[in-house]
Image: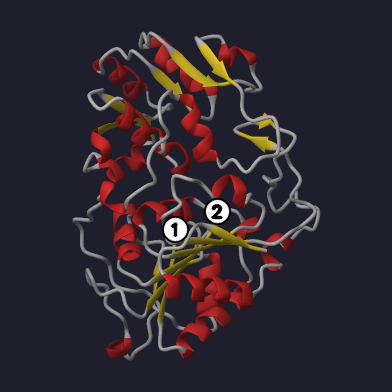
Amino acid sequence: ISGSCFVLIPKLRQNYPYAKIIMLGNPHFADLYQNKPYDVQYWGYNPRNLYSFIQLFSLPRPDWALVPGDNRYGWLAFVRGAKWLIAFSGDRSAHKQWCFNELLPLPKHAVAVAVPDMMQKLCTGKDASPFQPEHWKITNYHPLPAYTNITKNHENQPTINHGATDNIILFHIGAKSAIKHWPTQNWLTLANYFKQHNKQVILSTGKGEEAQLDEVQKVTQLPCYRGNLSLLQLIEVMQNVELIVCLDNGIGQLAKAIATPTVCLFGGGSTILFAEAKFWKNIPYRSVTTDIECRNTSLLFKRKIDWIQTCNRSINDCIHQSPHCMQNISVQKVIQACEKIIELGLEPIQDYK
């Protein structure tokens, strides 16, 4: 379901135009595929639900099964009778790999290969053409809720309307892990910068991620969506703003498909792996990061790959006991990225260090 795996769909459709493509994924993300991009059928699967497993047998027997990431899901395709199973090798538990007909190696050397570009190696044929926003339409059929924590002067509050994107900047500041939090003062400084340039800032966060938003609201009463948006409602908001500033999480990946200009802040995550990709090269997206020595873990999809430099630690496991990788991202670097992307429009994905 992630932006990294999504690239498999256009590549398959491009090389096998008459194939029936079924994508198995988290039921919560089914709405993203409501309009069947690339004529793909999305099938929600919950591994903790027996009925969800039984439903798989109503699907046609697959001729070809591609398993990105965790190889344990290959057994689903095997039980369903897939004729040929392909995945990447190197998963830590050997029994996960017994069901596959073909295992492909991940790159062994430090090269600028983004995860979406790696994923394309799972299937044969010409690589997918760069993403075009018109290939993926997402529609929200439910009205947006009212802002929370707004000021009393309602006349100055922005209204989200389709096509009315000018002068509205969205900060999606929520993150499940505290290791990804950007300092509250930095968000306040960035908001003040946009205010001085006659831009209206609105805030959003996911459910259960409201802690930092509350810290910001103690100082400023910016209009916000405090964890009360469905996925489709959040997408509508993201589609109808001039710029998104967010963190390296699922929202940062989703912003690429929406194609609203986006500046994404990377702390422990690798911009080479998760920001840059040939498939997304025409999307108005910039990443901001900083060099730090403790970005030194070498795991990708539970596989140890020596050349990878990333960090998957929690705040409790962090050697600094605080997110230095995020704290070292200056407001000025973020402002520079925002100015570039608003001024120039479509820009190749690029990181600022």
Q: Are marks 2 and 1 in contact (CB under 8 Å)?
A: yes
171 lies above or below 149 = above
Front-most of 353 and 25? 353
Image x and y of residue 249, in percent: 52, 52
Element type at mark 1 = loop
Element type at mark 2 = loop
337 lies above or below 114 = below
Left or right for 267, reference 76: right
Amino acid type at image mark 1: Gly
- Quadrant for the N terminus, please: top left
Which disc number belongs to residue 206? 1
Label 2 vs 1, first from the N-terminus: 2
Left or right for 283, reference 271: left
Amino acid type at image mark 2: Lys
Image x and y of residue 237, in percent: 32, 65
Residue 227, image quadrant? bottom left
174 lies above or below 108 = below
Q: CA distance from mark 2 to mark 1?
A: 9 Å
Which residue appears farthest toward the front when viewing the image? 126
Residue 288, image quadrant? bottom right
Left or right for 4, reference 145: right
The coloring applied to the image is secondary structure
**Pointer 2: what residue?**
176
